[in-house]
Image: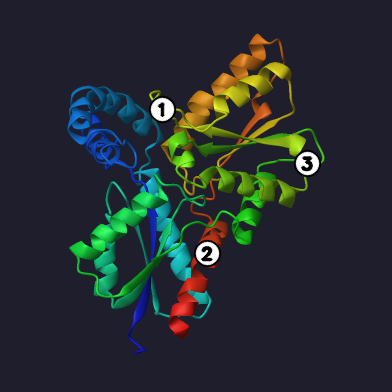
Amino acid sequence: MPAHTRCGVLLVNTGTPAAPTPKEVRKYLGKFLIDKRIAPMNRAAWWLILHLFILPSRGRKSAAKYEAIWTDEGSPLNVGHEKLVSGLSAAFGEAGFGNTVEVRYAMSYSEPTISASMRELKDCGCKHLIVLPLYPQSAYSTTGAVHDGVERAVRKIKWDGTYELIDNYHDNLTYIKALAASIKHAGFDPESDDMILFSFHSIPLVDIEAGDTYELQTGASSLQIASELGIDRKRWTIGYQCRFDKGREWLSPYSKDVLARWAESGVGRVFFVCPGFAVDCLETLHDVGDEFMPLYFEKARAAGRPVSDDHFVYVPCLDRSKAHAKVLYEATSPYVGAWLDD
């Protein structure tokens, strides 16, 4: 292939408001919640319910939560992805790929959009695209939405190259080892009575009944991480968080219920880990510290258990770390190498 031909790598996540204000949060949620993969209701009826009742209330409440986690650099999610792009680009350079690989990130429901980032890659001379949705465990509502967005962008910008989407990397050995190392780094002692709660985003049960393999992948990831740590099944469990509504049945047990049970029955230190979240965001930065942790301590003290602050330990996402950049490199480089060898 010509020397100037390049391969693009696109990291894609869900999205974030442009600012922690009710107006910007409503704008973001309006795009997110109208997606048929997120809310599969009658379009016209759902649009009215969404704009007349849900967005006015949720916009205010969510804006306050976003404001609490916002940084001087902006949205934690965008900042984290910008750092990851730099880290992954450096990893490709160090591996000898030179200037043949261009890395960008995009969001399904906010800026930068998938089409905008793909246009940048096209303008850079990229003739092939590797898309990595930053959901280690794939799901109809997440990875599927990225696939939809890429197909729309292909038509919109008249992408004239080839592309492929990596469905998941839930059992990637580098990913497993990086998570196990992060848990140990947070203070987890495999030889103690420390416990681990692997908390994943929940999905509707109807998706699983339709063939979604998300639950199998969350189980496989958790088992492999626990095996890497050398702990038996009694030391860890799985929970699910972030139900969208109460009108549908969602994948459980819920993380809050697991924490309540552990708090009341008495266990060792609890390490709360979110293997399905690539970068710390509202669901981790706010929900863990402001909802899950207070719940655990409240239930423990109500049960008469003496607890201190170190009884609940949140293990941050891999986020912008060098270890995470290495994970993404290991997940994408075989695809890049195979294309360059053609």
Question: Which dot, 1 or 2, sits closer to the camera?
Answer: 1
Q: Are marks 3 and 1 in contact (CB under 8 Å)?
A: no
In which quadrant will I find the N terminus? bottom left
Q: Which residue is mark 2?
A: 331
Of the numbered discs 1 and 2, the one sitting upstream in the chain is 1
Q: How far from the left and from the top, in percent, is residue 169?
A: 54, 57
Q: Please tell me which residue lies in front, 266 or 34.
A: 34
Q: Residue furthest front?
A: 210
Q: CA distance from mark 3 to mark 2?
A: 28 Å
Q: Residues within 10 Å of mark 3 (few under 14, many from 20)?
A: few
* Discs 3, 2 touching: Cβ within 8 Å: no
Q: Amino acid at mark 3?
A: Asp
Closer-to-camera residue (39/172): 39
| Badge 1: residue crowd in 10 Å (few <14, some 14–19, many ≥20) | few
Question: Which residue has dot 3 on it?
Answer: 232
Screen quadrant of the C terminus: bottom left
Q: Is residue 115 visible?
A: no
Q: If you read the primary sequence from the N terminus, does the residue marked by circle 3 or circle 1 appear first?
A: 3
Image position, residue 147 (x, y; %): 35, 56
> Residue drawn at (29%, 26%), measured in percent from left and top?
58
Location of residue 270 by image quarter: top right
Amino acid type of the residue that numbered disc 2 sits on in the rendered structure: Ala
Instruction: Report the side of 307 relative to 286 (left or right).
Output: right
Q: To which residue does mark 1 refer?
A: 248
Total numbered labels placed on residues in the image: 3
